[in-house]
Amino acid sequence: MQYMLLIHEDESAYMGENGAAVMEATLAGHMKLAEEWHAAGVAFSGNRLKGADTATTIRYENGGEGTLHDGPFAESHEELGGYYIVEAADLDEAVRWARKIPIPGKGSVEVRPVWQD
Amino acid sequence: MLADQPEPDPVGDVVPFPEPIPDDRLRLLFTCCHPALAREARIALALRVICGVSVARIARAFLVAEPAMYQRLTRAKAKIKAANIPFETPPSREWQFRVGTVLETLETALAIAYRNAAGTGETGGLAPEVERLAVLLAELMPQEAEAHGLLALVCLVRSREAARVDREGTMVPLSGQDVAQWDIARIEAGRTALDRATAIGKPGPLQVQAAIHLVHCLRRETGQTDWAAILRLYDVLTLMRPTPVVAVNRALALARATSAEEGLAALDAIETGRLTQFLPFHAVRADLLASLGKVGEARAEYDAALALDPEPAEARLLAARRDALGS
């Protein structure tokens, strides 16, 4: 079964004095996770996204054409920063992988089963 | 041959090793309390699966309508399927994430059992089962202060079982119980468990509730109830758990420690909401109104309490008090 791991993190963790070091450590964590998946033969894919300030949202009130807005869909201090799609036997296994995603400071990882017929 | 010996647990964090929970029901309880399910759904599922409590009673315990509780259970079951939540005994490293809900489930089960003063009928076997599971849980997780707190609570609550109904099967309120009928062995077991919990140094709502019951039990030795101490304990409980249900119990303690007027004022200051479905809210309000001579209002509150389908022994008590109101 496939699960999507949606990574929400506080982008400000990468700013300021230690920002570069935090970024480096986080990326190293992601590399390590990818290596673990390779070593375990687990199928996965994923991407890192550009900052939330590059986001554009089409908002719909009642279907129709929708209107373009600057920014992510929800104003919060935790922005969607990337995602993985990973093969796991069940939710517990998916959560075990999700827990290995490095989150500097505040954030969350949402684990969602991918629709499969 | 040495080379054939298994490696010493290099994958202990991924492979669930069998760490047996020494009881089928306790195992199921931990299984139901999967943290990926909503809290109330977990507890409801656990109560349903383990203790066979009807959905109607579970709904009443959570102060929600029966269809709403059905919906929560249905949603939980659908998520188990859609998200492929494994329904199996969790490995011991997961217990810490589940024990809180396991304790809440048993506390809720005990509350449901406590409503049934006579201890007969559908929920009659619930209190002994909660005690049995509390004993096992305290043995399984000896460092968990609240597990000992639950054990203390169930022992102290059950110590008064024999005194809770009279010969006619009418519930006897705590203040009217014959202390000679209280079970000394259970009171002592409760005290020991509470001491054990306190020694761990992690206070929690179950320990505070056990302490409240222990103060009640002390009437056996002192001949009176220290309502001021009980009120202070309710103040502590309110900080840990600022719910309307706790507020109702605190209002009763306040009434006993000070006056019926003050108790009633505190009761009326609570945000009612779901409380209209909470039987003790009406029963306590009725008693306080009656003691203040407000007969008409008291009668209406007894009727409201009786409409919430109390267990037979409590229904008899409420009806008797209503009928004794006069006019």
Image (tube, coloured by chain):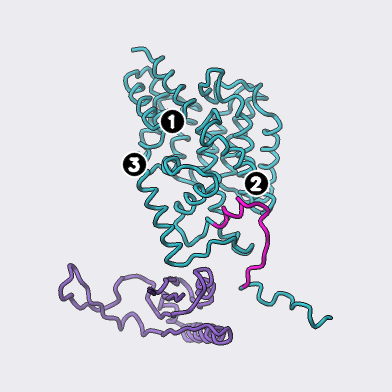
- Foreground disc of the pair 1, 2: 1
Q: Is residue A107 visible?
A: no
| Residue B208 coordinates in the image, percent (x, y) | 57, 42
Query: Which amino acid does the dot numbered 1 rest on?
Result: Pro
Residue drawn at the location 64% of the way across and 62% of the way down: B92
Q: Which circle's residue, 1 or 2, is located before the other in the chain?
A: 2
Give the alpha-carbon distance from disc 2 to disc 3, as whole Å. 33 Å
Q: Give the residue at mark 2.
A: B148
Q: Give the residue at mark 1.
A: B310
Query: SS class of the residue under badge 3?
Result: helix
Query: Which amino acid does the dot numbered 3 rest on?
Result: Gly
The stretch in magenta equals: B15-31
- Foreground disc of the pair 3, 1: 1
| Residue B233 coordinates in the image, percent (x, y) | 55, 38
In front of the other: B87 or B14: B87
Badge 3 local density, few (<14 within 10 Å), some, or many (20+)? Answer: few
Output the letter for the chain in purple: A
The answer to whether dots 2 and 3 both sit on one chain is yes
Query: SS class of the residue under badge 1?
Result: loop
**Vertically, is B51 above or below A10?**
above
Q: Give the residue at mark 3.
A: B273
Residue drawn at the location 45% of the way across and 40% of the way down: B57
